[in-house]
Image (cartoon, helix red, strand yellow):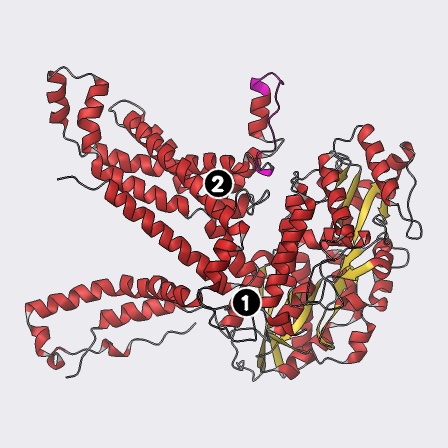
Amino acid sequence: MTVTPPTVAAETPQRATRRFRTTKGRETWAGLAMMAPAGILLVLFLIIPVILAFTLSFTNARLISPNPPRFVGFDNFVRAFTNDPVFLQSAWNTFLFALVVVPVQAGLGLLLAVLVNRRMRGVTAFRVIFFIPVVTSIVVVSILWRFLYQPNGLINSMIDTITFGAWSGMDWLNNPQTALGAIIVLSIWQAVGFHMIIWLAGLQTIPEELYEAAKMDGAGPWRQFTSVTWPGLRPTMVFVLVTITISAFALFVQIDVMTQGGPVNSTSTIVYYAVRKGYEQQEIGYAAAISLIFFVAVLIIALIQRRLTREKD
Amino acid sequence: MRRTVPAFVAAGAIGALALTGCGQAGQGSTTTEDGRTQITMWTHSAGNPAELEVYERIISDFNASQDQYEVVEESFPQGAYNDAIVAAAASGDLPCLLDLDGPIMPNWAWAEYIQPLGISTEITDSLLPTAVGVWNDEIYSAGYWDAALSIFARESVLTENGIRIPTTDQPWTAEEFTAALQTLKDAGYETPIDIGAEDTGEWWPYAYSPLLQSFGGDLIDRDTMLSADGALNGPEAVAWGEWFQGLFAEGLAGNSGTLGNQEFVDDEVALSYTGVWNALASVEAIGDDLLILPPPDLGNGPVIGGGSWQWAISSTCEEVEGAREYLEFSFQDEYITEFADKQIVIPATEGAAEASEYFGPDGVLRPFVELSQQFAVLRPETPAYAVISTTFETAAKDIMNGADVQETLDRAVQEIDANIESNDGYGF
């Protein structure tokens, strides 16, 4: 790869325009310059692909084909909703996943945050332990859990030991009834530490005086939580809910590594299905349409959430 | 008014653009210091040192044999290889020489990624038919080897349990095979046969569509190549599906465990349906007790998959002459033998097989050569194969997991047919 050195580097102050001499002008330039790297990357990797996906979704474009793509109007969208049971199943699975993960992960994160938000010995160690899965690559985590879930894996050995051999577990990832549940468990375990840290940051913004005042008024721990902690965590809660929702809808890696959408499509998700259609089956136009549906769905849900959790003045 | 751009804005822009630039495969003719023309070459062999070693030797021999060209090789891991090719093709960066998995060849030839091979017919005529890739009556690819599948067993175990040892002339019938599995299960093997169901990807159509063909079904109607209807969801295909589902339901085969042949080597399973590439470890571990058996005749004779990795020349290659010269140079028996013995694959020429330690007339793996010659069937040679392959994999996995056979196969047919139709029949 060759990069020619920037030819505009020889910028001389004498040649500068008048606007450049004013403070405001210089600030504008400085602002633009600081924005440039991020801005260019955003345009290249986000804005352009979104526009492309929007355009492609109304064509029958292929990943590989000697024939030029044709404009097919709304065919792809009609096909998705009327003639593609696997798409509908994937949408349902994704929704189900989010429905369980969002409240459970947010609640568990808050619980852990409250537990480690104390000044006592060894609390840092716990924070580290809860946070380790977050910084571990999700691919690695998925492979590890695939081993745990095997019929002769650690989880089944544990069940076997605890029940004294009465029940030796099951093939978690190959059973349509349990596969999605198994993935939900590992996903929560992996990501809960991140939201614990966010909650913790929120907890630490609540002034200590409020707790002291509450104690003077005779509030117990539970009353302190409901009257002081929870109202103080409102902005944090909105952030946590929206980020978990969006990442839950974007479930992909765990599926790709662990089950490839199986057994019997019980773990196929929208993003996984779009990738599968687009790359494995080379139907880029249809995959773009699925991505667009996904985009609109997430947008709507995020807007509803914002509306439900907005500040009531 | 002239607008000027401050240096750091430009630098930021160039930096961002530089990040998006990918490694150029170097389509333009690059000339080396000593005036040679470079020929770029991609392989899928990263992570396979035995294979890579032979390629490196061929390349250095070729480069030393003349002073006009220099072949420059770059290797990718197999998992990411097809994606790399598709991405490179989309951005016009294909190398001159590339290897590809046999069944994907028609898809790439149809997409005009690769051009007719054009090497001397004397060479291609001497190769195993399954090592030559033909599309539209043109040869597009050729390989140094083929692979084959067989059933591994221990002679002592079969004799002990009173199971007849099958031959290529008299393979097991479907009833015999099922009875043998049942006997072995009763003899204490938890899952008597390892068919590799824990694997994913191309292994599924490669390993299990031959069983479907042995039942009398197929992945697609090969007469027209326009529809899978009747082939993949007819009564024969449903019979295959029921049988395949039964293997798992009755605990005759498992779908977890380790990739490869370890369970068989450890005697945890009595039989192993596996590829030639896994043979050597079993030979070393089991020695004379090892049997290499033909797969069962499930109604229409035993069938095994044919077609392995082969070489092709990209359509954008500017040094076609040099690329052909290299390929012709590389098809020497000496190299083909070395591939066969280092990688444990079936050599593609008679001469190379004669000289091979394992595949020669007295070689311990000779049965594979016979299996390949007698029973190999290529996967359908159509650009639709990319879709057929993934659709079949999903359907077979669903069947394994207990889905309704007829319904699953009907849906697979619908998916394949819709794809063929939306591609205007792929030129058929």
- State the SS at label 1: helix
Q: How many marks?
A: 2
Label 2, on which residue? A141
Element marked by disc 2 = helix
Q: Residue at x 31, y 40 (%)?
A: A241
In x, y percent, where is residue B377? 79, 61
Mark 1, other Cα within 10 Å: few <14 / some 14–19 / many ≥20:
some
Q: Quick check: can you spot residue A69?
A: yes
| Left or right of B29 on screen, residue A7 | left
Residue B202 at x, y percent in the picture: 65, 55
Q: Is residue B103 above or below residue A295?
A: below
Main SS, magenta region, reads: loop
Tell me, yes or no, whether the highlighted magenta stretch contains residue A162.
yes
Chain of the residue that carries numbered disc 2 in the rendered image = A
Write down the residue under mark 1: B86
Locate the N terminus of chain B by quadrant: bottom left
Q: Position of residue A307 (x, y in %)?
A: 24, 44
Question: Where does residue A257 sit, x and y in percent of width and height?
Answer: 53, 46
Which residues lie in the magenta part?
Answer: A161-174
Tell me which amino acid carries mark 1: Val
Residue type at the position of mark 2: Val
Dot 2 crowding, Cα within 10 Å, few <14, some 14–19, many 20+:
some
Vertical placement of A162 versus A57: above or below? above
Judging from the image, mark 1 belongs to the subunit labelled B
Q: Quadrant of residue B47?
A: bottom right
Q: Which of these two is toward me, A306 or A233? A: A306
Give the residue furthest to the left: A22
